[in-house]
Image (spheres, grey):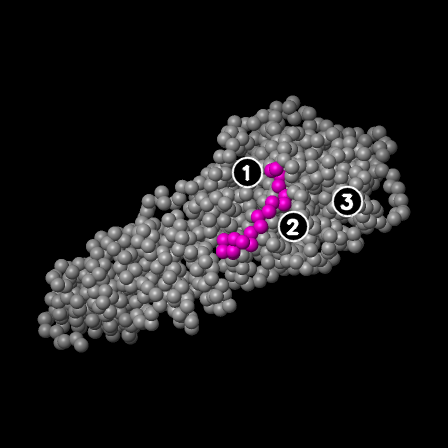
Amino acid sequence: QCRPMDVPSNSRLLMLLGQLERMSRESMMTEAEIARQLTAKILHLIQTQDLQTTLNILYILSELLTVGGGRRVAVFVSKGGPAILLKLLISASKESPPSEELMLQLHSLLAKVGPKDRKFGVKARLTGALNVTVNLLKQNLLNSKLVLPCLQVLRVYSSNSVNAISLGKSGAVELMFKIVGPHTKKNTTLLKVALDTLGALLKSKTNARRAVDRGHVPLLLFAYQDWHRNDTRQRHMLIRKGLLASLRNITNIKCGRTAFIEADGMRVLYNTSNECLPVRTLDPLVNTSSLIMRKCFPKNRLPLPTIKSAFHYPLPHVPAGGPVAQIYSQMPGVDDVVDDSDEETEADMENDTENEEDEKDCRNDDIETDLSKLRPREIHSRPFEELRVYDKFFLELSEDFQVSGVPYGRTRVDEPPVNSTRHIHSPLLVGGIAAARRGGGGGSSAGGSDCGSEGPEEEGPLLEVPDTALLLPLHDPDLYVEMVKGTASVPRYSEVAYPDYFGHVAPTFREPLLERAYGVQRAKIFQDIERLIHPNDILDKVVYDLDIPSGPVIADDGESLKFNSQFESGNLRKAIHVRQHEYDLVLNSDINSNHYHQWFYFEVSGMRVGTDYRFNIINCEKSNSQFNYGMQVLMYSVQEAIGGKPRWVRTGEDICYYKNHFSRSSIATGGQKGKSYYTMTFTMNFSHKDDVCYFAYHYPYTYSTLKMHLSKLEDLRSPQIYWRQDVLCETLAGNSCPLLTITAMPEATTNDHLCPFKNRPVIFLSARVHPGETNASWVMKGTLEFLMGSSQLAHSLREAYIFKIVPMLNPDGVINGNHRCSLSGEDLNRQWQNPSHELHPTIYHTKSLLQYLAHIQRAPLVFCDYHGHSRKKNVFMYGCSVKETVWQSNISTSSCDLHEDLGYRTLPKILSQMASAFSMGSCSFVVERSKESTARVVVWREIGVQRSYTMESTLCGCDQGKYKGLQIGTRELEEMGAQFCLALLRLKRLTSPLGLRTQQHFLDVESDLMETRAKVTSPTTYVMEEDEPSFQEEVDYSADSNDDDPDPDVEASNEPEDAALHLDTLSDCETANHKK
Ligand SMILES: [Zn+2]
């Protein structure tokens, strides 16, 4: 309806527009530059016209911008079009009354171009356009033609958080509530836009509070219910989702959550969700509802008197300012007060959303950039005289072997088995510690080495079991019991867990990764919410409790399962019978600490057959777990063992791991407030009546097991094997820390034989500094068994090297069921820079051995500390490389034209070629600041060992190679330990002058390096979520994710927005304190 224009400039304008049109149509934008110039001219012209001309230009502009697939809009925006339109809007608004038609046109255009302009929100605010639109809306709420474009513009405005506050003050929230309401068939588009706007406005806490104060929460709930009931053909998902989004944002603040609870929101969302469940397309609604309910679920503290470990161990001295001093200097009861300070203190610290772009990738923060720290250097801070005392651990270097007739190996009396079964008592008790199943709460004194030796208690029924001593080369139940007697635990355990006694015969069947059923996590969360909805189902009966003097086992009518974990490496603190077939379990903190729970090992009995029992470990701490990616728990059934299958099996259904409603005290999180614990849940259907079953995080491997294995390994000695077992030192609790020396005996005692013998390179291995990483011990067992083997390869290996091995760096932690620490309440793998003689004896002396070797110019060829990894699959290594660290950091490359021997890559490379569980792609050679006091980094930097590694084995399974899709078992772990030995043998060939040191090999390493350089290998500190493929159901673990909604203009499609909805989990600052 353009009128012919009569002003000369208008004809010029028309000409220009025509030219632009033509060009856009014909020239495929090759003449984009000319197009830009034209646009600029057009814009200039618009500003100088009278009303009607302006309108005409706007009509043309509108038509022009409607076609062209967005490219024209982009050009228009890039030339400052939106700003000009906003200015026009302001000047037009000053007319009284303003031209309705002009307002309509301007808003229509702004609605079109605004979403494409990143600075639109700021521009609108600075020009003063926000109020123009709001006032226009207020005056024209019934003018259906004008309302829609105004709302659309408002929606763009409000996506800017500063604008949202300003708009709220101008009454925009109230305005939206005038439009939003119960089900209607009219104006659904309008409603949808209003809801989007409202959702954006309510992200501002001030606005959310305003909505709560005006009583809008019940209104939103009512509207949601109404739409739910009437939208039976699911045509208005976006409106229902919009209502939920508003509720979600309101419940980010405490008073919003309170209002939600008071309005019976839990029940409303619970019921509507249940009705939505059968329709898969409604999942986004169920998921958002679930999110809101979880957020509003009253926060509880753990049902414990204190989060400090149930056991305390008095240290020889408590370093001021250390973790133990901090814990025990607190007033009683302060330690886990759930902080009530709501995020309402927040102040709407609104940055422009436009500026939030630059906080992208801060993953590299932890990389060491101090070049002086990256240059390995030997630190001879200790006089050699001080190290002389370690001579005794290196006898092989001075021995002359003149005295022959040293009894090599015990005479092996291979007595034929008399019986293939043996008889044992139940429960298994050792050492004459009379009271069975003692209370544990008060256990506080130093370890009990006062065990007598009267043998098993004469009590309980007699069981006939297969004799695993005949099945397992290194196992002997009687010997195990003997070893337990010499093991000192802080709680003075007197029981022996059956699995450790019987031993584990690895099953021969495959144990595939558990496929996760769709909706498991959601179903579990709904069951949790039912605790509030159906309070009558709650039993809340404590059945096991380390914190009560009469406990831990609590007498019971036989209706509940029985729990126990008073044995080596056990760590159950409390079990609560919550509902009929459901138990909440609380793990004990590491001794002298108030956190670190992940490892578990406990016994269950009194089960019924054919019943699904749900177990929830409710105080896990890591933000994600392989339990979400196919890992199952381990179970050992005594009935199965008696039936001839003594073994741990992967089991449990409906396994998942998610953030729960138990608050973590900021005291245990390093000051971070508002953190929650995580639940690891699994369901178990037992197959034997009257069974005694054990559950563990991973295959247990106790300190007593190690001692038994070492004793049996010693029996394998032959005259060709040099084997020595020394006591490196005693631990805090008085347990000895074994040190092994293994090599081949010299063939003769003449100098020409002794000299090469003494000059064999040293390989230094250690394991199990982290007690919860039992897999490390199984890998070590594989290494040791190979080393003591009779094969030619084993012999060659012994001839090639002298092995120094500390198989368990943290016996006390292992014995007492710790997950991470030693009795000092500290992570021993963070003490290598400055280990304390008193508090970290095993580390202190191990480091001294290495210093000794460095001093005598015999620094190890390879150092490797075996670990387990809880969040990744496969086996891999971390090493240290200056170059690779520099590449990953922002240090300018000119500052470090380093020459680095690539030898550190050889061993992992060999492993990746020979061990199918090993993944080169997961290896990293970056030196991180946070790891500067780990064994790997200190041995590299201070001892000067170029090949200094951590070898990480998965707790879960493999996603590559021969074992792809399978969970890892002891067989594979032991195999890994043996393959490590074979790799050392190949390393020998490659490093010895006579070996196959070909060009080709180095080319391989080079090309390998180039690959790594191209793709950023993840530094060890970070486990990115992309490590795992996503499954259909979004995992709600991303506790730390930001509350970022997608662009407001992405509206038509559900999916991107849905994803964001799920990810946006419980805000971290919510800490409503509703005590039980
Ligand atoms: Zn570790």
Residue 855, how many percent across, how many down?
Answer: 64, 29
Q: Earlier in the sequence, mark 2 or mark 3?
A: 3
Residue 426 has which mark?
A: 3
Q: CB of mark 2 within 8 Å of CB of mark 3?
A: no
In the picture of the structure, the residue carrying the numbered disc 2 is: 560
Where is the N terminus found, in terms of image quarters? bottom left
Confirm whether the magenta stretch covers residue 546: yes
Residue 543, how many percent across, how many down?
Answer: 63, 45
Q: CA distance from mark 2 to mark 3?
A: 20 Å
Left or right for 1058, reference 455? left
Q: Which residue is rendered at x = 46% and y = 38% of the image?
A: 671
Q: CA distance from mark 2 to mark 1?
A: 23 Å
The magenta segment is 530-548
Q: Residue furthest top?
A: 385
In the picture of the structure, the residue carrying the numbered disc 1 is: 305
Q: Which residue is rendered at x = 80% and y = 37% of the image?
A: 455
